[in-house]
Image (cartoon, helix red, strand yellow):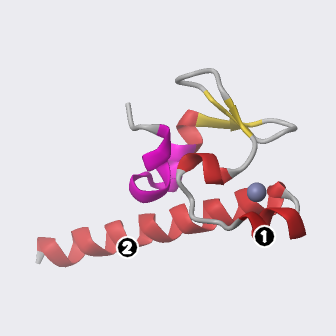
Amino acid sequence: MIDVKKVASTMTLPEYKKRFIKDFQGVEDTKTGKTHYCPRDLGFNFTIDDCTKRSCSKCWAKAERILKLRENLIIGGRTSDGK
Ligand SMILES: [Zn+2]
């Protein structure tokens, strides 16, 4: 199991969506049963300012965009390796 602090640096969006379920306060980690209120818990490098100026629903949207970008990079890497 990937350590929750390493989600930001290692997971792709589909992996994240398999493990974490959105609830009304944040996301629930299905591996530990814990609720995380802000993606900073998962190792995302957002500042406290990001959180206080905006709601954490925006933090989660940003986190998902970062994971999605990683997925594209990995897929791109695989195709160039194969040739
Ligand atoms: Zn936040």
Q: Please, what is the dominant secondary structure of the magenta stretch?
A: helix
Type of amino acid at the residue the image marks with label 1:
Asp
The span from disc 1 to disc 2 (Cα, nearest Å) is 28 Å
Task: For ligand 1, give the image quadrant.
Answer: bottom right
In the image, residue 22 sits, relative to residue 63, either above or below, namely above
At mark 2, the secondary structure is helix
Indicate yes or no whether the magenta region holds residue 13. Answer: yes
Q: Quadrant of the C terminus?
A: bottom left
Q: Position of residue 38 (x, y in %)?
A: 72, 49
User: Which range is magenta?
Assistant: 4-16
- Residue at point 77% right, 69% down? 50
In the image, residue 76 sits, relative to residue 30, either above or below, namely below
* Quarter where residue 33 is shown: top right
User: Which of disc 2 and disc 1 is earlier in sequence?
Assistant: 1
Q: In front here: 72 or 83? A: 72
Q: Position of residue 35 (x, y in %)?
A: 71, 31
Given the current orientation, which residue lies at the most extreme left position?
83
Q: Position of residue 29 (x, y in %)?
A: 61, 31
The residue labelled by disc 1 is 49
Q: How many marks?
A: 2
- Residue at point 86% right, 63% down? 52
